[in-house]
Image (cartoon, grey):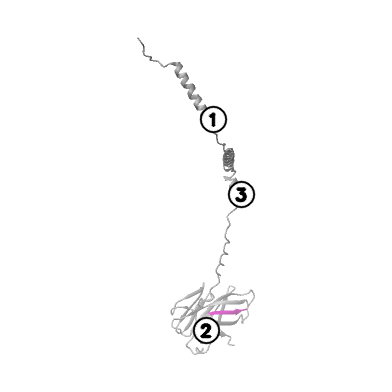
Amino acid sequence: MNHLRTEADPGAEHAETERLRAELAEAAYDITPSRLPLAAVERRGRRIRRRRGATVLGAGCGLLLVPLALVVLPGGHSDADRIKPPPASSPTAPAPPAPSASASSTDPAPTPRIVASGERVTAAPGFQLWLTAKGKHWTTPSAPEPEFRSVADGNIDRNTPGVTVQSESSDGRAYLSGLYYGGKGTASGVDIETEGGTVRGKLIELPGRPGWGVWYAIAHIKPGSDSPHWVSQVTVHDTKGKIYAQFPTL
């Protein structure tokens, strides 16, 4: 009785393998291999090497810059701050000149002080003046009893510019006063020329522009001076700087 083979025959498998090898070798001999692209391979290799070199160099520079940026100089400023140029500043405009302390030329000229009839003006201790419709009243330290100079007794012409002078001295001081009248415009100030120099006086008037007023001033007397002509000139100016009235009349 014949038995079926359940296992492959080793001899047959070996023969089949050898046959396939022979066929593959014969086919391979018929194939002509293509040339390798060596030049392209070399160019690509050089590009890759250059890129790697640039990457390494950039990374190295970055590592060098980091420590430099962290160096801080004494006082809290880095090297970068030290070499940084200062910002350009724009030129500063000169400050405008301070306004002058002198009075403006547009300021109005002073005018006499207006007083009520009988109102007493104290020029100095013991030296008082007051006006009434009849004229000038005053006292001085050496003459405490009131004195009077009339403007209504006919002794003065109020239509003609004029100035009177009354002078009394005490303890080295001269108490000067008088009437002014008849000038055009508005009286503004008075200058008194004395042996000791020019003295600036003050003016008072009654309300309503009566056409007359009183001037007064205080001056120091030089030791030993007893001249009866101690006051040489009295000039009353108007608000325009012109002469309102003057003594003596020129």
Residue furthest out toward the left: 1
Neighbours of disc 3 within 10 Å: few (<14), some (14-19), many (20+) = few
Magenta residues, start to end: 189-194
- Residue 6 vs residue 100, the one in the foreground: 6
Q: Who is closer to the viewer here, 180 or 89?
A: 89
| Quarter of image, res 230 | bottom right
The vertical placement of 206 against 72, above or below, is below
Circle 2 SS class: strand
Amino acid of disc 3: Ile
Q: Is mark 1 on a helix, strand or loop?
A: helix
- Front in this rendered view, residue 142 or 5: 5
State the CA–CA distance, disc 1 to disc 2: 153 Å
Quadrant for the N terminus in the image = top left
Q: Position of residue 32 (x, y in %)?
A: 55, 34
Pair 3/2: label in front? 3
Q: Position of residue 104 (x, y in %)?
A: 53, 74
- Which residue in the structure is indicated by mark 1? 29
Q: Which of marks 1 and 2 is in front?
A: 1
Q: Residue furthest front?
A: 1
Looking at the rendered structure, the secondary structure element under dot 3 is: helix
Q: Magenta stretch: residue 233 in it?
A: no
Identify residue for label 2: 180
Between discs 3 and 2, the one toward the N terminus: 3
Return the mark for residue 83: 3
Pick whichever of labels 1 and 2 is earlier in the sequence: 1
Amino acid on which the number 2 mark rests in the picture: Tyr
